[in-house]
Amino acid sequence: MRILRSLSFPVLFILVCFLVSPKVLVAQESAPTPTRLALEVTYYPGRKPAYQTVQVADSQQQGGWYALFGHIASWRPIADAPVIRAVRLVPRIEGDAVRVIVSTMWGEKALNNEQRVASYLIRENEKIHIEELRQFGIEPFGIKLIRVAPNLTPVPPVILKGVASLVVINAVSVDMTLPSYRITLFNQSGKDIVGLAVDVATGKKIETTATPRAQDGKTLIAAGKTYELQVPAPVRAQETPNGYAPGTLSNPEILIKAVVFEDGTFEGDPESAAEIRGYRAGEKMELPGLIAAVDKALTSPSANVSEALRNLEVEVSSLSSDVEPVLLKSLASEFPELGKEAAQKIKIAVQVSAIGTKAKLLNDIHKLQGEGTQALTANEYREWLNKTRDLYRQWLARL
């Protein structure tokens, strides 16, 4: 079985949100092409299934994670076996069917280890059980491929909660496989925005949550500019005469509850702002070590590109992602209203972000290794190193 050793930053970011709450939204800057196909996933015995959109073959979407699953009571782990924290399903169209890749995920600080355990080719209305999960003590998931009819649901109210810098220009339903909304926001402040906190709630109950940010330390919404926020509607399984079908909840509200500016100030919910600040701090903490590793590779030329990539992989993997106490204390002091819990919340955000930043580079290294380094010349490898170093230096400068 192939071991997938790292995850890109966006993957970890989405995953962290999922582990905090099983009901999570992923805010996107652009809507993928609707396929009208979805997986109905039975992930826990006795619970209603969840729904996951099937993506096109070349999609950059990284699938879905399930941190809640049933355990087989009689199962006993082998010595030194990792504790599985989540199961990942990645469904993509393949010809007239859908390929579903199944992986298990683990890690002490973040789920930065992944092992592929199964691959299925499934067709419309077909249902299968992932029996391979039994070897990890996990009750087999059931997956069924369904076709979803177009469904433009009414747009819920968009509420700016303690946020004065944003103006809602427009909010519309989007033609997606599963219901979604697109909200056009205008930054009327004089400062660039680097992160948002968004909830979808029904009454006092939060159904989904996310903290969208731009990649590589870039600005999310420049001062005086607009931004389109993609918000998936909360979808729940509803019973029908023929089984279950995806349905939307009644009377939801979209709450934009915090913004964080480039200078570190914020509006709205301090806990959400602290989390976003923690993500940026984790990147800033990890990037100097990554840049140094690439610099070292540039000063150690080798005609054997495969060996050079292995050496770089080892160098990057050995970098620490532990949070420095001084950094943690400094960040926590900026949010006195959160009390003693602030340090732990910020620590989690910093640590996961640092690990994800390192994983981004490892992911690129593994991609080069997977494409076959025999075809990569020493000059092309050096060119890649220079571009990577420049990218990471620019990223660090933005923070």
Image (spheres, rainbow, N blue to C red):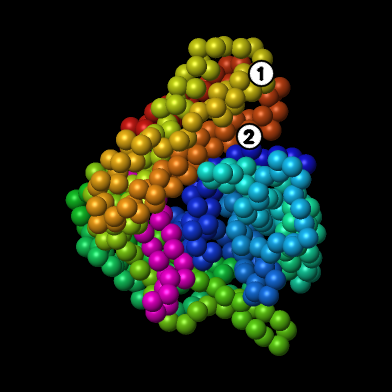
Question: Is 331 rendered above or below residue 46?
Answer: above
- Magenta stretch encompasses residue 207: yes
Look at the image and tell me whether residue 259 can be seen: no
Q: Is residue 104 left or right of residue 290?
A: right
Q: Is residue 375 left or right of residue 126?
A: left
Along the line of sight, the residue nearer the viewer: 109 or 14: 109
Q: Nearer the viewer, mark 2 or mark 1?
A: 1
Residue 371: percent from left, percent from top: 68, 32
Question: Is 166 rendered above or below residue 347?
Answer: below
Number of numbered discs on residues: 2
Along the line of sight, the residue nearer the viewer: 274 or 76: 76
The disc label shown at residue 152, or none: none
Residue at 69%, 64% in the rendered image = 70
Residue at 34%, 72% in the rendered image = 158
Q: Which quadrant of the structure image shows residue 176?
A: bottom right
Q: How crowded is the residue under tag 1: few (<14 C-alpha within 10 Å), some, or many (20+)?
A: few
Q: Which residues are magenta?
A: 195-220
Residue 216: percent from left, percent from top: 42, 40
Question: Is 379 rendered above or below residue 191?
Answer: above
Residue 72: percent from left, percent from top: 75, 62
Residue at 76%, 72% in the rendered image = 125
The disc label shown at residue 367, or none: 2
Q: How crowded is the residue under tag 2: few (<14 C-alpha within 10 Å), some, or many (20+)?
A: few
Question: Is 391 rendered above or below residue 178?
Answer: above
Q: Which residue is mark 1?
A: 307
- Magenta stretch encompasses residue 359: no
